[in-house]
Image: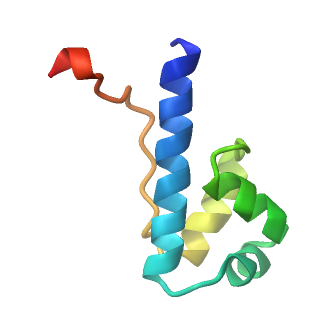
Amino acid sequence: MNSETFEQLQNRLAKDIKAARRAVGLSQEALALQAEVDRTYVSQLERGIANPSIFVLYRLTNVLGGSLRISLEKPETKDAQ
């Protein structure tokens, strides 16, 4: 996997975390408190500049009511379409 593909996965995860948080009506601070992580870390995750552990993803998913879906599938590229 090249770095561009990893960045695509990271950006997709960032968008998914933010969308799931907004869908359940939580602020970054509320999500962080309930998931027992720092608010700045949630911000970094949503901006795609931090890489969460599986444990942190598990905590976030529990707080978000299971509304966070995580896929490690290779994103489709423009060439594949």
What residue appears at the point 75 percent right and 80 percent down from the top-left corner? 29
Q: Is residue 71 above or below residue 75?
A: below
Residue located farthest toward the left when viewing the structure as drawn: 81
Q: Residue 49's quadrant in the figure? A: top right
Give residue 62's position: percent from left, percent from top: 58, 71
Left or right relative to 50: residue 60: left
Give how far across and how far down residue 58 sits, in percent: 62, 59
Q: Position of residue 6 (x, y in %)?
A: 55, 26
- At x 51%, y 48%, the residue is 13
Q: In the shown orientation, is residue 36 left or right of residue 1?
A: right
> What residue appears at the point 49 percent right and 55 percent down from the top-left corner?
15
**Residue 71 visible, this orientation:** yes
Q: Is residue 37 visible?
A: no
Up-down relation of residue 34 to residue 47 (above or below): below
Question: In x, y percent, where is residue 79?
Answer: 23, 14
The mark tally for this picture is 0
Location of residue 42 with respect to 76 vertically, above or below: below
Q: Quadrant of the C terminus?
A: top left
**According to the image, what is the colour scheme of the structure?**
rainbow
Of 59 and 74, the residue lying toward us: 74
Q: Is residue 25 above or below residue 13?
A: below
